[in-house]
Amino acid sequence: MAAKAATAAPGAMAAKEATAAPEAMAALTAMAAPVATGTEGSMPGKLIRKIAFAGVTGSLYAALTISLSFIGFGPVQFRIAEALCVLPFFVPLSVWGLFAGCIISNLFSPYPLDMIVGPAATLLAALCTMRIGMSKRSGNFRKAMACLPPVIINAVFIGALIAYYIAGANEASNTRPFLSAFLVSGLQVGLGEAVVMFAAGLPLLLYFPKSRMIGRALAGISGD
């Protein structure tokens, strides 16, 4: 069944991604703009805006994942909401919004342990992306590097999670031990994540600073 999904995925999933990514960007633009309003010099006001932005991020992550759950779970997955994992590059507090959004989303996962493993992977990847965003280096290469943590960490964490269930289901016949299942699942998850991060996440990283509305919103809440 995974093989069937792997062959059917590229065309259909690319079409879904092409429509879902712009919709997600439009929704974030609409919701981020009001967040940036307020007294610029007020530290409490700035903290409130950061918390509000994290809440918007988590809500959007959950909404995208749940509404596109048919491609967001399973051995071959294209979780479009993962493109939002680039936001900690600009706004560190959005790490916690992504973490909360992933917890809510994974209530619908077919894998019970995904309630723990999935959010842990998202949190770790978001923290790594945040650290890359805080780096003094500039340029598009740094932004491309910021897309790698979700790919690598999800390939390891979620690949191992899926392999655990596959190996468990085949334990009696011992036809697919954990290591073989992990190599296949990790590769499938990593490739799906790479498609999302570099086809949707990286364009968002490049676009946000150039957008007047989003640029103002991020300028009002980024930094310490």
Image (cartoon, helix red, strand yellow):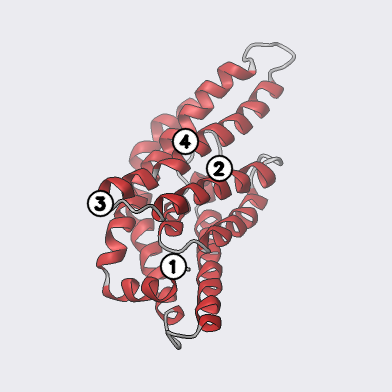
Residue at which label 2 appears? 73
SS of the residue under disc 4? helix
Q: Amino acid at mark 1?
A: Gly
Tell me the CA gap for discs 2 and 1: 34 Å
Q: Residue furthest right?
A: 172
SS of the residue under disc 1? loop
Q: Amino acid at mark 4?
A: Ile
Q: Position of residue 105 (x, y in %)?
A: 60, 54
Tell me the CA gap for discs 2 and 4: 17 Å
Tell me the CA gap for discs 3 and 4: 22 Å
Quadrant position of residue 99? bottom right
Q: Nearer the viewer, mark 3 or mark 4?
A: 3
Mark 3 surroundings: few (<14), some (14-19) or many (≥20) residues within 10 A: few
Q: Could you say which is closer to the camera, residue 121 or residue 173? A: 121
User: Does the residue at mark 2 contact the one at mark 4 (Cβ under 8 Å)?
Assistant: no
Tell me the CA gap for discs 1 and 3: 18 Å
Q: Residue furthest bottom?
A: 39
Residue at which label 4 appears? 152
Q: Nearer the viewer, mark 2 or mark 1?
A: 1
Please give the name of the residue rendered at 45% of the width and 34% of the height, measured from the top-left corner.
Answer: 190
Residue at which label 3 appears? 139
Q: Residue furthest front?
A: 136
Examine the rendered structure and indicate whether residue 145 appears above or below residue 4. below
Residue 223's label in the rendered image is: 1
Q: Amino acid at mark 3?
A: Gly
Q: Position of residue 132 (x, y in %)?
A: 41, 49
Dot 3 or dot 4: first in sequence order is 3
Q: Amino acid at mark 2?
A: Phe
User: Does the residue at mark 2 contact the one at mark 1 (Cβ under 8 Å)?
Assistant: no
Tell me the CA gap for discs 2 and 3: 33 Å
